[in-house]
Image: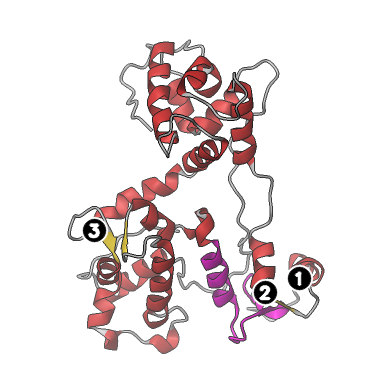
Amino acid sequence: MAGSSFSSSSSSSSSFVCVLLLCSAVVHPKPTLRKERVLHDPELSRRTHEDNRSFQYDHEAFLGKEEAKTFDQLSPEESKDRLSKIVDRIDSDTDGYVTTAELKAWIKRVQKRYVYENVAKVWADYDLNKDNKISWDEYKQATYGYYLANPEEFDESTDQFSFKKMLPRDERRFKTADLNGDLAADREEFTSFLHPEEFEHMRDTVILETLEDIDKNGDGHVDEDEYIADMFAHEDGGPEPDWVRTEREQFSDFRDLNKDGKMDQDEIRHWIMPQDYDHAQAEARHLVYESDQDKDQRLTKEEILENWNMFVGSQATNYGEDLTRNHDEL
């Protein structure tokens, strides 16, 4: 999801573009290339778990690729000190132990750091009263204020994703992201609102919005022609490319699981959210297994620091060569 800012004082044309960017519903000419809707978790590292115990895969999985490079510049003492602070953040229930589930959650957060950075950039544009929360009213005013005040300027008949349709869709998504139901999103809730594909509890929303995007006849299903039209348009009336014919076969063989000629929400889920191998879960289990000295299937801070080299360590061969580098804490 994009996180473009929006001001109610903007012109109608620029405001229209900005809000649609926010809602991932920008109206472009129909694509002639295949559109990718399938969601995959990002790879944790391009490296492999090596037998020589260099731990580079573990470092990139635990810290993220860029932060792992930063830690390569630190001395062992600095690495351990920063790791100690990170452990406090991973231990979300503050019980003094890091579980596999907490490690998995941390790894997933690290791997989608760009999402949180994106939200941080636009936060001030929506937190109008500066209370460190974004209410639905604040978001609606910042995003739809110009439309609500000047509806006559918008020709909804020509816009597939009109403000009139997007406003209730955004409100529905906002309320789903608002886990405590107070109609005011904290940073985590607002992040899940702008980037629902990254959060488990928002997956049903992603599926529903995908269905609504593709289901042109409004029957609550996606048939083969709608499935293809989402990827390809016969602009010149010529023959379909080979990849389109292959996609028709894919629809028949693998998308339409119950063979009724159309996809329902469960079949859309199976399509866009395949049950891939859970790399974060596997890495969390690996880190716990390798560091769990008393074999109680959870880690103390002492156990993690004892095995610090697996989590963040390096040979620090370049330590001191880049003293001007900014080592911001995770």
Disc 1 marks which residue? 251
* Residue 272 % position (x, y): 64, 62
Quarter of the image for residue 47 reads: top right
**In terms of depth relative to the viewer, which is nearer, 55 or 161?**
55
Name the magenta segment's main secondary structure: helix
The residue type indicated by label 1 comes to Phe
Whether residues under marks 3 and 1 lie with C-beta atoms below 8 angstroms apart, the answer is: no
The mark closer to the camera, 3 or 1, is 3
**Helix, strand or loop for disc 1:** helix
Specify the color scheme.
Answer: secondary structure
How far apart are the two marked residues, 2 and 1, measured between alpha carbons?
8 Å
The outermost residue toward the left is 129
Whether residues under marks 2 and 3 lie with C-beta atoms below 8 angstroms apart, the answer is: no
Disc 2 marks which residue? 227
Compared across the picture, whether 243 is left or right of 177 comes to: right
- Which comes before the other along the chain, label 3 or label 1? 3
Compared across the picture, whether 284 is left or right of 82 comes to: right
**Helix, strand or loop for disc 3:** loop
Q: Residue at x 43, y 57 (%)?
A: 192
Disc 3 marks which residue? 127
Residues in magenta, as a range: 203-231
How far apart are the two marked residues, 3 and 1, measured between alpha carbons?
44 Å
